[in-house]
Image (tube, rainbow, N blue to C red):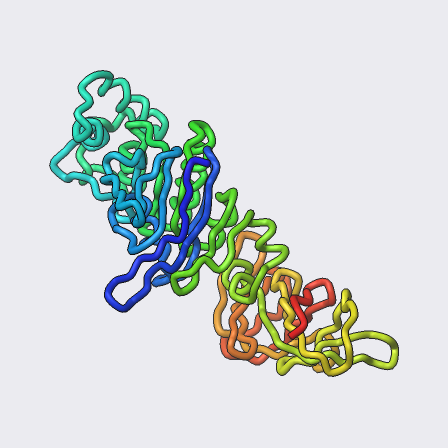
């Protein structure tokens, strides 16, 4: 394994920012730390980088222990073999692009092959033609490319990325995201990426570690976490699913439904459930659709609270109980619910997954 984190805890006074975090990442792997603001993902990344000192735990990079509370080991950041890219780019304004990228080599006392290394790093990010420019002469996307080149110039063992695209508009963010992934695959560098954007996490990662209140709530490949969420938080935060509590009702025809406060849902794979048993159901919004009327089985009551447009469909933000999910709606449908309008969601059995019996 290229990176091992074991039992890392970090406190700021009485606040526990990271609690007993553990994971491992193989060489060339791409792991995303995903979570909302305040979940501890950036603090955990900074502990790996050596910018923050944990209160307990062990961190190994490339088979070398860089932090151990028990053994009182704390290797300084510049000796850990990590490259760090920050949200703010952190470029020196008085230095040219070339000088900014060469700076980590200078700090480490390297004097040979500097030009070759810088040219190689800039070439990977298509920035060779701008090496004499200053940061103020670059766009936000170009500045971010320079930050990437600077992090890669000394061939680190692990690349650490702290929400690097959050200051960019959506089209540019998506383009740079794809470029970064291609570079990462090309050079095979082990990467840990911090974001609160679940689509970025799902599209880029080999594994996702989902953080909540300082703890890793779940970790695994995106497909596994999306198809089989291990808990309601993962289902809601990563999959955008609706999480409902219900009571089993067996009907005369043999069907089994879950009676919820938002409506009744037919369960296609009910298993050995008994009348009156409490269950938890996950509803995939991508398999639901809006309806003007409802009241029967497989319809849920909701209210429109927002609207966005994708390339092929509209996405209605619908509040169901105290949750909000995004429901696709055909662009060619003449019915366009207005904001605050009460609607129904048709949720066929395929959209509902029985998570667990309570």
Which residue is pictured at 23% across the width and 27% down the height?
131
Residue found at the very far left of the displayed protein: 94
Question: In the picture provided, is 56 more to the left or to the right than 331?
Answer: left
Residue found at the very far right of the displayed protein: 253
Q: Quadrant of residue 325?
A: bottom right
Foreground: 280 or 144? 280
Which residue is pictured at 64% across the width and 75% down the height?
358
The image shows residue 86 at horizontal and vertical percentages of 28, 46
Q: Is residue 194 visible?
A: yes
The image shows residue 222 at horizontal and vertical percentages of 55, 49
Q: Is residue 165 visible?
A: no
Foreground: 55 or 292? 55
The image shows residue 93 at horizontal and vertical percentages of 14, 39
The image shows residue 284 at horizontal and vertical percentages of 62, 63
Q: Quadrant of residue 245?
A: bottom right
Instruction: Identify whether 2 is placed above or below 33.
Output: above
Instruction: Identify whether 80 is placed above or below 68.
Output: above
Which residue is pictured at 52% across the width and 55% down the height?
310
Foreground: 330 or 86? 86
Q: Quadrant of residue 43?
A: bottom left
Instruction: Identify whether 326 is placed above or below 46.
Output: below
User: Across the whole image, how many numbered discs are drawn on residues?
Assistant: 0
Which residue is pictured at 27% across the width and 25% down the height?
129
Question: In the picture provided, is 199 more to the left or to the right than 296?
Answer: left
């Amino acid at each position: 394994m290229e990176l091992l984190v074991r039992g890392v805890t970090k406190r700021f006074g009485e606040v526990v920012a990271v609690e007993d975090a553990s994971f491992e990442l193989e060489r060339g792997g791409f792991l995303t730390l995903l979570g909302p603001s305040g979940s501890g993902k950036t603090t955990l990344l900074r502990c790996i980088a050596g910018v923050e000192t944990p209160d307990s735990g062990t961190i190994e990079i490339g088979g070398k222990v860089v932090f151990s509370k028990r053994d009182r080991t704390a290797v300084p950041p510049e000796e850990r073999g990590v490259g760090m890219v920050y949200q703010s780019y952190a470029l020196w304004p008085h230095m040219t692009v070339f000088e900014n990228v060469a700076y980590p080599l200078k700090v480490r006392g390297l004097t040979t092959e500097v030009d070759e290394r810088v040219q190689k790093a800039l070439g990977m990010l298509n920035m060779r033609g701008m090496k004499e420019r200053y940061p103020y002469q670059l766009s936000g996307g170009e500045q971010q490319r320079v930050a990437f080149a600077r992090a890669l110039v000394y061939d680190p063992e692990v690349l650490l990325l702290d929400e690097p695209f959050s200051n960019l508009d959506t089209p540019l963010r998506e383009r740079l995201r794809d470029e970064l992934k291609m570079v990462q695959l090309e050079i095979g560098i082990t990467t840990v990426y911090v974001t609160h954007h679940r689509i970025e996490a799902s599209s880029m990662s080999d594994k996702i570690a989902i953080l909540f209140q300082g703890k890793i709530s779940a970790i695994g490949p995106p497909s596994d976490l999306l198809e089989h969420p291990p808990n309601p938080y993962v289902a809601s935060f990563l999959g955008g699913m609706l999480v409902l509590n219900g009571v089993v009702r067996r009907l005369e025809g043999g069907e089994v439904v879950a009676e919820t406060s938002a409506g009744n849902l037919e369960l296609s794979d009910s298993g050995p459930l008994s009348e009156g048993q409490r269950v938890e159901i996950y509803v995939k919004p991508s398999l639901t659709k809006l309806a003007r009327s409802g009241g029967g089985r497989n319809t849920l009551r909701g209210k429109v609270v927002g609207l966005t447009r994708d390339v092929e469909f509209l996405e209605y933000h619908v509040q169901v109980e105290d949750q909000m999910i995004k429901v696709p709606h055909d662009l060619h449908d003449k019915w366009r619910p207005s904001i605050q309008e009460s609607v129904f969601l048709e949720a066929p059995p395929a959209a509902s997954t029985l998570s667990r019996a309570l």
